[in-house]
Amino acid sequence: MSVKEDVEGNVVIGFSNNNILMLDCDGKEEEEVITFAREYAKFHDLGSALVIKTSETKQLSLNLRPLANYCIIFGRVLSWEEIKWHIQEAYRLGMVDEKFAEMRNYSNLITIRVNAKNKEKPPPEFVHYFHNGDDTGIIEFLRFWSICKELGRKDDKNVNGQTRILLRAVQ
């Protein structure tokens, strides 16, 4: 990697929190993540759920459907002990990988990227919002995202307008 290529990266900004359940669901089909978010939020009374695509992958499922990396943000505020339990449960159900689950043993924070990482990894894209009562965690994430989404590279596109639409939907 040349110095010039390295400089074209971005300052990566993340939303960190220890009382909002946020799950990294890497290498999954979009419909699988949306269904999981909706059903899991309803079953465990976690409030609303926001599904975000954090990046594309070049992989396909066995059904030849594209796989991507996603994040789910739930609306209800929880204790860290509850969040750790939900992370272990999501791991048991195959929605998060072992690395994500094990990291929670060393840190009491979850961090989700809010801006572009580089040209290949644009800002996270909102995929699905499921209204289920409590939106507190989602609103907190969206407020931070709306401030930071365009920071970094000047050529980031496709982020204007999403904030107004989502904030209106959750309020």
Image: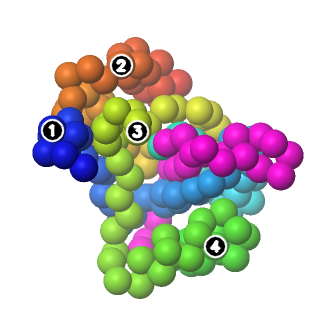
Q: Distance between the residues labelled 1 and 3?
A: 18 Å
* Residue 140 to residue 146: above or below: below
Tell me the mark number nearer the camera, choosing from 3 and 2: 3
Crowding at mark 2 (Cα within 10 Å: few <14, some 14-19, many 20+): few
Q: Distance between the residues labelled 4 and 3?
A: 25 Å
| Residue type, mark 3 in image | Lys
Q: Distance between the residues labelled 2 and 1?
A: 22 Å
Q: Can residue 90 be seen in this view?
A: yes
Q: How far apart are marks 4 and 2 (CA)?
A: 33 Å
Residue at 38%, 52% in the rendered image: 112
Tell me the mark number nearer the camera, choosing from 1 and 4: 1
| Residue, disc 4 | 91
Q: Which mark is residue 121?
A: 3
| Residue, disc 2 | 157
| Residue type, mark 1 in image | Lys
Q: Is residue 57 magenta?
A: yes
* Residue 64 to residue 126: above or below: below
| Residue type, mark 4 in image | Tyr
Q: Does the magenta stretch include residue 126?
A: no
Crowding at mark 3 (Cα within 10 Å: few <14, some 14-19, many 20+): some
Percent coordinates x, y for residue 80 in the rendering: 42, 74
